[in-house]
Image (spheres, rainbow, N blue to C red):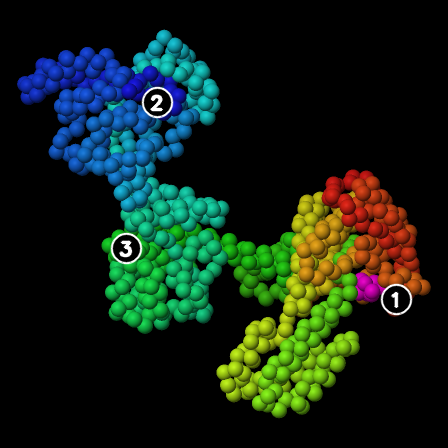
Amino acid sequence: MKFQAFYDSPFVLKFSFEKLIRKMEAEASESSQYALSHQRILDKTKEFPELLNGISNLDFFKHNETMMKELLRDLFPPMLTGNEIKAIGFPFYNFFFNPSKRFQSILKNAGENFDLFIKGLDPHRFYVMSCCLILRDFYKVPLNMSMPFIFDIPNEEGIVNHYRFLNNVDFVDINPLEEYRNLTEEEIGELLDNFDDYELWKEKFPPKSWELKGFAVVNFFDATTEIAVSNLKSKLINLEDDKNLKSEMNKIFRSIFQVPDLELGFTAIDFEENKFVRNPINGVIDSFILSGGIPQDCKNELLCEKNFNTLVETRKFFSISDVERTYQEFPDSTFAKQFYESGIKSAIFAPIIKNKKLLGIIELVSRKKMLNSINATKMEIVMPYLEDTMDRLYDDIETRIQAIIQREYTSIHPSVYWKFRQEAERHIGFYREEFDLPYRKITFENLTPLFGQTDIRNSSVSRNLAIKKDLEINLMMISEVFKKLSSDNDLEEINQKLVQYQNLLNNDLKADTESQVQNFIHQEVHPLLESIKLQNVNYNQIVTDYHKQLDSKTELVYNFRKKFDDSLSSINKTLADILDKRQEEQQRRFPFYYERFKTDGVEHNMYIGASIEPDLTYDPIFLKNLRLWQLRVLCETEIKYNIYRETLDYSLDVSSLILVYSTPISIRFRMDEKRFDVDGSYNARYEMIKKRIDKSLVKNSHERITQPGKISIIFSQDREREEYLKLIKILQDQNVLSTIEELEVEDLQGINGLRALRVAVNYDAKNVEYDFVEVL
């Protein structure tokens, strides 16, 4: 069997023991101390010229194993073979000969199918490192090649141990062959600056152009804990982005603790309520303390009071070496029982503390009795990294929470956040000097407003129909129950009331019809059924079966109303998500203030102008493009909803509207309401129009201005009409909009002279483009 490199190499390998033999010859001639022992071995080596010239067939080692061990005796003392991990090999190659007994044992425990491979040594790095040997030893270039080469070798229990190795190359010669290239200083300098240029290295050192003759003594060192901690740090850096994090973390901790089934967990602590609780980190790392379900009380439940005090008050980790024994000692402990029944035999708990704040508990558990106070001390090595990581995760969680609150619940849009921050920083500066400064008004002046909405048509009618159907079904179910119970009970009076309410539902719902029927069911029917069910088992079953058909929260039939509510909520979310996503993209053109509200549909307010971002140059083209964007996004919501509605239990119509208002206005943040509103009475007309146009009619008709499948654009000035006709033309050319109607809006209270463009949406359009238009 010939020796072959795992990857391409600049070397032709020749196993030779010439250097060792010459050294032994010199020692035998210079010192009588080694003469006899060396000479006996040297006499045997003369029978094998390949030991000097080079061994090309690896079978030589197998056939002459005894002689080779004698030759290598000084390098491999028999007294140390059970302790040292070493063998004969070549630098960067995974062939080894004459392994020490300890190395043999390690390889045997790894299994027959295990293949030794240097971690992180790819073909490129292998080739370049081989070339570096030539640069160092032949060209005498001072290179430091002490890189941490690692072998990952599993033991018999599957735990991966990490072994660092060093090559002793005292017995290696590097010789050029005919194909070699003699390098100039300039070429060597070019190589030193281009480690990553694989082809350059192969050009300067062609494959098999050099001879590597001799052998290396490879020494291994168990660096499992060191490497595992290093791997842990790498994993913790990308904690949230690693899909295999759970299994990888378990593997790392198993290497550190040498426990084959060890698992890592984390449980957060809510000290305000004195509870162990789940938090978003448990989406990455499980909690064993809470594996039984609901949050638990800390002090009274953590196995025993003594252990809790150790963990929380002294903030030092503790171990349970025998869960079964602890359960017998504390049979009332929920956790002891939980761990015992889940098969956990031993555990270590360590508090995560950052800035004197207890964040939670790291858990290490095993289904073997292998964790104890002795190996728990290894936690001291990893705790600083875990504490920093958990602190970072908590900060990230808090940041996300704040982002959600800002997006979903407040009016502080990112486009105006700078002004709020500016005011906050001003206050922080003054408070340091102990000045009690009042907060200034936060206003933005000379802004052009844009308002739009996508309204769910006839939502009140649909909601009432759903309520009516549920109430009718509920009363019908009660009627059936009464029939089954009437033989032993006088139900005539309540049956008459039941019929009255059933007749009441035959007509359209009035404002108080729903509450009347619900009160009848809750206050009269259900108390009566609760008393009747106690009469016998049969009645109990009848009443129980009836309650099973009701919603657990409302104690009423909630089928059609739930479908309506779910559909409405889903529609609102779909429409709002499109708006939110698209406005984030549009903000890159020029920042504008944006807010949207979910009602029976989604409406949005936008304001744009120079005062939103004083550091940028504002141009009217940004307003025109924002108006085009608004028209585009309403088209997209209409088109996408038309497809999405097919998936809903309640398919509801929607209609869209845009209000055009060209007069600049100012907005002010109202501290009492925590929201922006128009500033000053002279701007109130805009808000009044917004509130009244929703249900407006076409002048001299009973037709609503807003219609399904169409976008209605309300305006008052001719120049607004001309501008929107241009915008509509752009979308008509893209086959997104089609026919246009020009309408007059009925006079509203205090408002007259409004007109409208109503344009039909083409639902066959594939997509809507959002390109910026420089000339409008």
- Residue 723 visible in the snapshot: no
Name the residue: 63% across, 65% down. Answer: 438
N-terminal label among 1 and 2:
2
Label 3 and label 2: CA atoms lie apart by 43 Å
Report the residue marked by disc 3: 368
Residue 121, percent across and down?
38, 30
Residue 725, percent across and down?
87, 47
- Residue 620 versus residue 344 in the image, above or below: above
Q: Secondary structure at mark 3?
A: loop
Q: Report the front residue among 745 and 98.
A: 98
- Mark toward the viewer: 1 or 2: 2
Crowding at label 3, few (<14), some or many (≥20) Cα neighbours within 10 Å?
some
Does the stretch in magenta take in 232?
Answer: no
Does the stretch in magenta take in 695?
Answer: yes
Q: Quadrant of the N terminus?
A: top left
- Mark toward the viewer: 3 or 1: 3
Name the residue: 30% across, 40% down. Answer: 154
Q: Secondary structure at mark 2?
A: loop
Crowding at label 1, few (<14), some or many (≥20) Cα neighbours within 10 Å?
some
Crowding at label 2, few (<14), some or many (≥20) Cα neighbours within 10 Å?
some
Q: Which numbered marker is on residue 748?
A: 1
**Three-letter amino acid code at the position of disc 2:** Ala
Q: Report the front residue among 509 and 401.
A: 509
Q: Which numbered marker is on residue 5?
A: 2
**Three-letter amino acid code at the position of disc 3:** Lys
Name, please, the residue furthest toward the front: 487
The magenta segment: 688-697
Q: Choose top left, top right, bottom left or bottom right for residue 656.
A: bottom right
Q: Choose top left, top right, bottom left or bottom right for residue 179.
A: top left
Label 3 and label 1: CA atoms lie apart by 80 Å
Residue 461, percent across and down?
76, 68
